[in-house]
Image (cartoon, grey):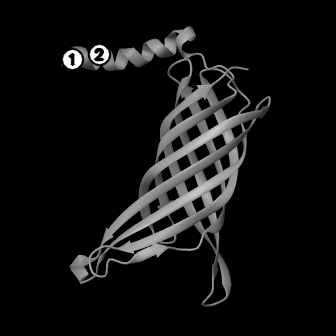
Amino acid sequence: MRSRISWLVLTPLVFLIDSHLAFGQGSEGSVSMAYTVLHDTESDYTFGGMSFAGTHRVRRWVYVSAEGAFSVHHEDYSSSQGGTYDFRYQSIQAGPRASPLTGRVQPYAELLAGVTRLGIWERRLDNTGGWGSPTFSVQPGLGVDLFIARRVALRLAGDLRLLFRHDNRFDTDYRTTLYRLNVGLALHLGES
């Protein structure tokens, strides 16, 4: 058992020490998949989900990035004679990304904009639900790619998504804030 733990610790260290294996090259683009934890400040719910992203170099350290994401939260109100509800967020965003450094650690900043929609389904009583109208969203974020192999990086990121909504009942505009943390893998393609 102890030898297995030693191998689990030593193997990533070998990738980090050997510069040929772990040196992050300036890439022409990347694709990534990440687990996402999203917190909705309006409902005070925390969602789990996935995000899929792709980037392409436009010029030197400027990239264009596109991302699709979905998150789900399940809430059970059956103890108070209510139903069980599934809340789902879906989004499609795109925008610029700046990643000025190359090497084993590559930080980046991005500003994405697009649409986000929320769907709600009741699963116990009526078995009804549906998607709400898509709303405009802006998502500034920061992240870092930590290379564990020549083209593969562990991606850690955080962002703030602002949803700009309109309430037709009261004819008012309001903003919803979503915080996200992402952990995943990025595959870097091509070299500069």
Q: Position of residue 174 (x, y in %)?
A: 65, 76
Query: As drawn, is 108 to the left or to the right of 62?
Result: left
Q: Nearer the viewer, residue 162 or 120?
A: 120
Determine the secondary structure under disc 2.
helix
Tag 2 and tag 1, C-beta contact below 8 Å = yes
Picture residue at 46% right of the left edge, 48% below the top: 50
Q: Quadrant of the C terminus?
A: top right
Q: Nearer the viewer, residue 150 or 182?
A: 150
Q: Position of residue 106 (x, y in %)?
A: 63, 29
Residue 127 visible from this viewpoint: yes
Query: As drawn, is 41 to the left or to the right of 164?
Result: left
Depicted 32 relative to depicted 83: above or below: above
Q: How far apart, in angstroms, are the residues tagged by discs 2 and 1? A: 6 Å
Residue 170 occupies quadrant: bottom right
Picture residue at 59% right of the left edge, 21% below the top: 104
Q: Which mark is residue 98?
A: none
Residue 138 visible from this viewpoint: no
Q: Which mark is residue 2?
A: 1
Q: Position of residue 115 (x, y in %)?
A: 63, 62
Determine the secondary structure under disc 1.
helix
Depicted 112 relative to depicted 148: above or below: below
What residue is shown with label 2?
6
